[in-house]
Image (tube, rainbow, N blue to C red):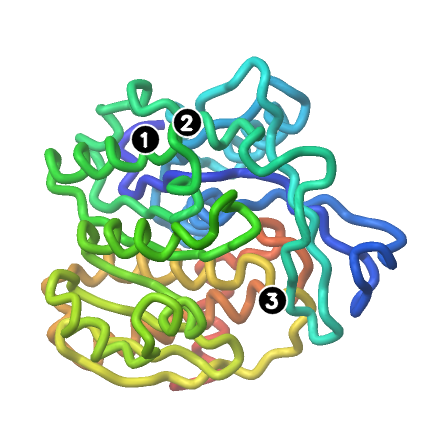
Amino acid sequence: MSNSRVLCLGEILYDMLADQLGRTLSEVESWSSYPGGAPANVACALVKLGTTSAFIGAVGEDKAGNNLQALLQEIGVDTTGVQRHPQAPTRQVLVTRKLNGDRVFAGFKDYDTGEFADTRLKAGELPEKLFAEADLLVLGTLELAYPESGAAVHRALELASQYDVKILLDVNWRDVFWTNPAAAPDKIRELIKKVDFLKLTKEEAELLFDTHDAGAITYRLNSVEGVLVTDGDKGCAYCLGENEDKLPAFSVPVVDTTGAGDSFVAGFVHQLLNYGVQNLKDAEVVKRIIAYASAAGALTTLKPGAIASQPMAREVESFLQEHSV
């Protein structure tokens, strides 16, 4: 596959989801394995919504890596940017769940965080051809936690700038991934200066900017075209093309929130490319884009797992017809 409109760079992994809700790590009796990793989730969700995507990241030369690469290909994601590491294993993350379905990242079982293949993404092996054909690059911040993958992020930024590719950063803060979490905020703030669109949770906004006001963050940065601040079942605040507003969340029976934010990002990017960045000046267009993104996120919470639960475009459109904004 070629001409992927969106590149998603970062981690792909297995979420080991606790089968029992409301249990601590030591109390969990059994786990179910689900493919995940925010950038990979976004890449898969985009294809299901009708936008071509490519995934760039590293996995081990192991069964888990084989299965994850095969899954991407089966869904229709371009995998020419997938690197394989001969020694480092594919990452698995233990995820416990609260009684309301919210997830808690609980560590990596038998390995330290820096031992996994995704930390070894090589800057020199990023396929330049993908950037030459793309419209938008989606990044997270977990790769900044490790020297090799951090260098790959900065190489991706150079290529995006060279080929005039827009950049969306989903902060996706996970302190468990960082060997030195105290260093993270400054590294993330430096990265934010180089992106066009910024998506944060309310907690991430408070951590990085001491406010969750999307407009205040946009004006303070004075370098981004839009800021989205999500707050789970309380909805999304946004400032896009100088249109600032909030949209309440859709009320749905939540089973598992894993990957909901990634589907939100995919829905946003899908509609942003459909409407065009130049149309963000239209308040009604912006509202439609955010409603679509919110619907994609809400539908993902109805079933367990991040990728398995992602909606198709027709499901999002049908949902929006039933829940007129």
Helix, strand or loop at disc 3?
A: loop
**What's the distance in space between the residues labelled 3 and 1, CA to CA?**
32 Å
Binning the other alpha carbons within 10 Å of mark 2 as few (below 14), some (14 to 19) or many (20 upward) gives many
Name the quadrant containing residue 288: bottom left
Q: In this view, does 68 lie above or below 250?
A: above
Binning the other alpha carbons within 10 Å of mark 1 as few (below 14), some (14 to 19) or many (20 upward) gives many
x, y percent for residue 253 = 66, 78
Say what amino acid the circle numbered 3 marks.
Answer: Thr
In the rendered view of the protein, which quadrant contains the N terminus? top left
Question: What residue is at 14 percent from the left and 74 percent from the top?
Answer: 219
Observer-side mark, 3 or 1, equals: 1
Left or right, residue 145 beside residue 221: right
Left or right, residue 310 beside residue 267: right
159 vs 286, nearest the viewer: 159
Q: Is residue 292 above or below residue 14?
A: below
320 vs 308, nearest the viewer: 308
**What's the distance in space between the residues labelled 1 and 2, CA to CA?**
6 Å
Q: Earlier in the sequence, mark 1 or mark 2?
A: 2
Q: Earlier in the sequence, mark 3 or mark 1?
A: 1
Question: What residue is at 44 percent from the left and 80 percent from the top?
Answer: 235
267 vs 61, nearest the viewer: 61
Q: Tell me the number on the disc at residue 121.
A: 2
In the rendered view of the protein, which quadrant contains the C terminus? bottom left
**What's the distance in space between the residues labelled 3 and 2, CA to CA?**
30 Å
Q: Is residue 312 above or below residue 51?
A: below
Observer-side mark, 3 or 2, equals: 2
Helix, strand or loop at disc 2?
A: loop
Question: What residue is at 38 percent from the left and 61 percent from the top?
Answer: 267
- Contact (Cβ within 8 Å) of mark 3 with mark 2: no
Residue receiving disc 3: 301
Residue receiving disc 1: 152
